[in-house]
Image (cartoon, rainbow, N blue to C red):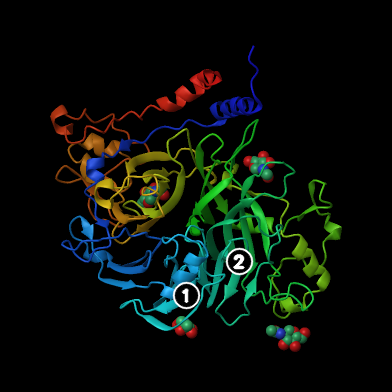
Amino acid sequence: MMTLSAPLLALLWLVQVVCSAFPEEPGPLSSIPTEVVRKYPVFLGRPHRSSLRQEPLHIQRILQVNRTLYIGARDDLFRVELDNVVGDEMFYSKKRTWESNKNDISICRMKGKHENECRNYIKVLLSRQGGLFICGTNAFNPLCANYTGDTLEMVGETVSGMARCPYDPKHANVALFAEGNLFTATVTDFLAIDAVIYRSLGDSPALRTIKHDSKWFREPYFVNAVEWGPHIYFFFREMAMEFNYLEKVVVSRVARVCKSDMGGSQRVLEKQWTSFLKARLNCSIPGDSHFYFNLLHSTSPILHLHGRDIILAVFSTPSNSIPGSAVCAFDMEQLASVFDGRFKEQKSPESIWTPVADELIPKPRPGGCAVQGSKFNSSNSFPDEMLNFVKTHPLMDEAIPSLGQRPWIVRTMVRYQLNKMVVDTNAGPHGNRTVLFLGSSRGTILKFLVVPNQDNTAPNNNVFLEELEGYNPEKCGQDTPQARQLLSLTLDSNSHTLLLAFPSCVVRIPVARCQLYSRCMKNCISSRDPYCGWTRGSTCSFLRAGTRLPFEQDVDHGNTSYLGDCDGKLTLGSPFLASPPIPKTHRTGFCLGYPASGSS
Ligand SMILES: *[C@@H]1O[C@H](CO)[C@@H](O)[C@H](O)[C@H]1NC(C)=O
Ligand SMILES: *[C@@H]1O[C@H](CO)[C@@H](O)[C@H](O)[C@H]1NC(C)=O
Ligand SMILES: *[C@@H]1O[C@H](CO)[C@@H](O)[C@H](O)[C@H]1NC(C)=O
Ligand SMILES: *[C@@H]1O[C@H](CO)[C@@H](O)[C@H](O)[C@H]1NC(C)=O
């Protein structure tokens, strides 16, 4: 007799959870053939068609400012005019090389780093007072500088990139300017041990998180930062400290600091945040056995949707679990209110984490912002007792619930992991449709229509409109998993295109492909694509917001029962339009057959 091992039992349990708890996941209404996608324009780091590029690009960051796209790569910075694209390639109008000097490179090599690591990878690329603020890893000796936006020339001296930019190009970091201060989240040292949220370069004093305190950070991976009200919010994931498990568990978090923080007293938290608090993000599928998506990958900016300020976030399961991704929404009001709730603590290293009793919380409330005109008008004057409490209790007890307490979109048992997203909240002819574009670890783009439900919480009738492979191996070069890693997904609403940044290229893809449904009205209507409508002259046209064109569409129902079938001859141009959703055979197979063959 064979006994099942503990991991196998755990897996069996997970399979049961997944197969019972996960909602149905219909396939896309249209799968776009690669021939269509391969025609879209690509940026390859060339000034014109006849030039050659010897070296791969190693793109790190892109930044759109009005009609200009800036691309930060390894040792190079490019400027591309978004309105000057003709044909199938985007060329740069300006290129500036910023290499590390010989001395920095030789020190980097002496410290045992590889030649490829001892280069200048641009990891911070921000717009600043008409120009650019840029930081590069500079051969493990990070530097920052101002650059002009038009000619891409460095202005003034370089400043240290320490605590503003990682040393290692592989590390995730975030940066933003708010009220003239630079807020960064990164690691400050060569060995990448000291993680930090840091404020600098403005009129306010420089502040940081406590060094080497695992209550504040434990191997964080920073994803995004946003300004909202008096705070800056940082989204990240890290090793949990609040579970008494033996194994390491990663959880997703949001932390916040007050923009007006001046640091603590001379005795406690001097030159450190007095307002740093963090809470867990709860993106899970409710049910008998709760299923969590613990790994945060990216977030949207704050969106104003259905009268709320919300933020959307893409999560996945860890690699040793059932492969799955989810999009959860968080209401900023609800999110902020968790920071007014209870604090979590561990009374002794052996005890479990519990909420702190209200009567033990000092006054004024720890983690708050100093209020002008009050007794405590600056954080320097906060009592030591309160500062000591913040220092030792950065974690909130409650997790931030997702809007509607379930994900907006779930994808499980698919080959890819979702990790990027961008939202168009002004889609369609009336500019009132919400379309969500998701990007995967292998360059797949998924397009969803978000259909609000009655109480505007967790719409579960979202429509999976399109799926396409965004990476173009023919033009971008290699076809490896690394090459297909989507670095960022942005929307240029002016030209109705998506910009997909990969390490070796940027691909520009229209938000819709209405012409594919042009042969037949039934295909156009059943696409349910809010960007497309059947217009005069019997064609399926792209509909700009505020269009005057008379059109027909049925985004809500895609009802075509009144229309005859598309004539076989006419639909030849779009044979991929399999109207019934693509069956999810792989998933059914998993739920029925697994793991019967795994016991050999
Ligand atoms: C960079 O530009 C900002 C704003 O224009 C200015 O305040 C700052 O001094 C500049 N820094 C350097 C190093 O030139
Ligand atoms: C804070 O209050 C003190 C008196 O309590 C006053 O002297 C000081 O100017 C105030 N500071 C600010 C920044 O308002
Ligand atoms: C996450 O939210 C669900 C409700 O959707 C709740 O049942 C669960 O306890 C929450 N988890 C945490 C850690 O708060
Ligand atoms: C969008 O606006 C149009 C015209 O004002 C209206 O008829 C339609 O119901 C709106 N759709 C949604 C989803 O709000």
| Position above or below: 179 against 488 | below
Closer to the camera, 139 or 357? Answer: 139
* Residue type highlighted by circle 1: Cys
Where, quadrant-wise, is the N terminus in this rendering? top right
Q: Which residue is mark 1?
A: 144
Inspect this view and state whether residue 25 appears: yes
| Position above or below: 245 against 211 | above
Disc 2 Cβ-to-ligand 1 distance below 8 Å: no
- Give the x, y percent position of residue 216: 69, 60
How crowded pointer 1 is (Cα within 10 Å; few <14, some 14-19, many 20+) is rated as: many
* Residue type highlighted by circle 2: Ile
Q: Quadrant of residue 74?
A: bottom left
Where, quadrant-wise, is the C terminus in this rendering? top right
Closer to the camera, 1 or 176? Answer: 1
| Position above or below: 260 against 403 | below
Q: Secondary structure at mark 2?
A: strand
Is 307 positioned to the left or the right of 493 in the image? right
Closer to the camera, 269 or 119? Answer: 119
Q: Secondary structure at mark 1?
A: strand
Picture residue at 56% right of the left edge, 80% below the top: 202
How crowded pointer 2 is (Cα within 10 Å; few <14, some 14-19, many 20+) is rated as: many
Which numbered disc, 2 or 1, marks the residue closer to the eye? 1
| Position above or below: 274 against 392 | below
Residue 197's disc number? 2
Q: Quadrant of residue 133?
A: bottom left
Inspect this view and state whether residue 66 appears: no
Is 186 positioned to the left or the right of 442 in the image? right
Q: Quadrant of residue 26?
A: top left
Is 281 positioned to the left or the right of 166 in the image? right
- Give the x, y percent position of residue 294: 59, 44
Picture residue at 56% right of the left edge, 27% below the top: 15
Residue 106's disc number? none
